[in-house]
Image: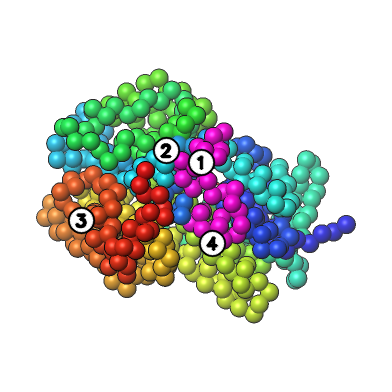
Amino acid sequence: MKRTYDIAVVGSGFAGSLMAMIARRLGHCVVLLERGKHPRFAIGESSTPLSNLLLEDLASRYDLPRLSPLTKWGSWQEHYPNVACGLKRGFTFYHHRLGYPDAPDPNRLNQLLVAASPHNRIADTHWYRAEFDEMFVREAQAIGVDYFDEVKLDSFIDQGDEVELSGNKDGHKVTYQARFVIDATGPRGFLHHALHLPEASLPNYPPTQALFSHFSNVKRLNQTSTSVGSEVPPYRVDDAAVHHVFDGGWIWVLHFNNGITSAGVAAVDEAAARLRLSDGEAAWNNLLNSIPVLAEQFADAKPEQPFVHVQRLSFLSGSICGDKWAMLPSAAGFIDPLLSTGFALTLLGVSRLAHILENDWEKPQFQAQLQNYAAQTKEELLATSELIGSLYANMNNFPVFSALSLLYFASASFSETARRLNKPQLAPLFLLHNHPAFGPACRKLLHRAQGVLSKQDSAALIEDILRAIEPIDLAGLCNPQRRNWYPVNPDDLSNSAHKVEATPDDIMRMLKRCGFSQ
Ligand SMILES: Cc1cc2nc3c(=O)[nH]c(=O)nc-3n(C[C@H](O)[C@H](O)[C@H](O)COP(=O)(O)OP(=O)(O)OC[C@H]3O[C@@H](n4cnc5c(N)ncnc54)[C@H](O)[C@@H]3O)c2cc1C
């Protein structure tokens, strides 16, 4: 018997499963279709305060309490010790010159440490996606989402009142009818092919590639070769998303608590060609050998997955929704793993689509709301590409690179605090893109950073960046005494309470609610 679903979600990464669960909780009849089979390897692992806060909000708004413990390291360990993850206390950056010995700088000019949490219990995590995504799909099934895996879809046919998705499973033709389709299959995914959608360009963004795998036997970072003096860093430097930056590219290293480490490199085409990234494992080993601290850390490492080389990393779809379909942000575009923006962008999109399903389904405004969703998604992906593009342009100029990344950290901590204070209207778009003062100032600074910068230009740019950040800085990022190490300090927040239209008491109450003290 033919069954018409209200909603078909294609792709069962965590975001597709989450979208399906929310639609189900809103009373819809939902099918979730997956090309592969769980558990499966997936890349994209490092979460941020904003992504965890969005997940927590969605879990509470849509009655998905079993997901809440996954938003903090402490509750995750307590409730789901069998689902692997990594402890992420912050963002760590080191600058290297390939082929030269690492020389720790007494002024810490070649490093940047930005804490994201004050202690482990409420810290962020790296999601071990094989287990994390499998759990999400099982949760979706448990609340009544119909799930089919190993479904190879090949067409999307608009039949007027509904859509027919067809393909094959286990060698047999299958069809699914739905009134609305949500594409959660990642960049250049299902609808991109089925509807022959165009790819849009990312202005001022360099073509980039990536090479990555999962490894066992990776040692912890040798802290003595990365720091100088007796001052204690704000967190253990590799309980973090560790970024090793060099001219034209950067390497990530993320440790999980199951003995696996995720590591890879992203680089502009010119650097990727120089490093011969398309050669895979050999290129990876050569690259490690040109950075002594990494050569030592990976001396006994063994790849646990075949290396993946991605020839073109960034993507923006020319269309993000139609009258019977929408893409999640992660299907609509991807910029780069740098700064871990993917989850937050995706969860903002899930939250907006959920809101539309909740308030506008079958109402005259449905299409207009979808168009609005598409415009916001595109704007946020473009804003992210402006930021990451200028970071790529300055990977050989670490003081400017660090200052530019503070634009991200300042806007992210402002957004997180505004949301925690229940004032999301202060930060409606990612990177405060439409903030009346910060938005335009940030765009101008990023544009300047794309040019060739003399020493003087660099110094002037850094000064102007700090000036632009100051009115939204809640984290002491403009304080030169921190010398590139930024802990989470309650005094920074309460002294800046007025910037989020709050009082120091409001801030203290918020910190208490969030479990700030150990
Ligand atoms: C190298 C790299 C590193 C990254 N690192 C980070 C990071 O550290 N932090 C961060 O926030 N973001 C990161 N990202 C982005 C992150 O991966 C995405 O935001 C995230 O994976 C989106 O999750 P998702 O569930 O939407 O999609 P995915 O995880 O891409 O899942 C898509 C699912 O759809 C299925 N599928 C694909 N095609 C079809 C089809 N035709 N039919 C049915 N099913 C299909 C796939 O099998 C898969 O299960 C990274 C991305 C890359 C490329």
* Badge 3: residue crowd in 10 Å (few <14, some 14–19, many ≥20): many
What residue does disc 4 label? 351
What residue does disc 3 label? 478
Image disc number at residue 76 = 1
Of the image marks 4 and 3, the number of the one nearer the N terminus:
4
Indicate yes or no whether the magenta region holds residue 79: yes
> Closer to the camera, 33 or 58?
58
Choose top left, top right, bottom left or bottom right for residue 322: bottom right
The residue lying at 53 percent from left, 46 percent from top is 69
* Badge 1: residue crowd in 10 Å (few <14, some 14–19, many ≥20): many
Say what secondary structure mark 3 lies in: loop
Q: CA distance from mark 3 to mark 1?
A: 33 Å
The residue lying at 40 percent from left, 30 percent from top is 284
Does the residue tagged 4 have its C-beta within 8 Å of any atom of ligand 1?
A: no
> Closer to the camera, 158 or 215?
215
The stretch in magenta equals 54-82
The x, y position of residue 180, in whole percent, is 68, 64
Does the residue tagged 3 have its C-beta within 8 Å of any atom of ligand 1?
A: no
What residue does disc 2 label? 87
Quadrant placement of the N terminus = bottom right
The x, y position of residue 449, in whole percent, is 25, 57
| Amino acid on which disc 3 is placed | Cys
- Which residue lies most toward the right here? 1
In front: label 1 or label 4? 1
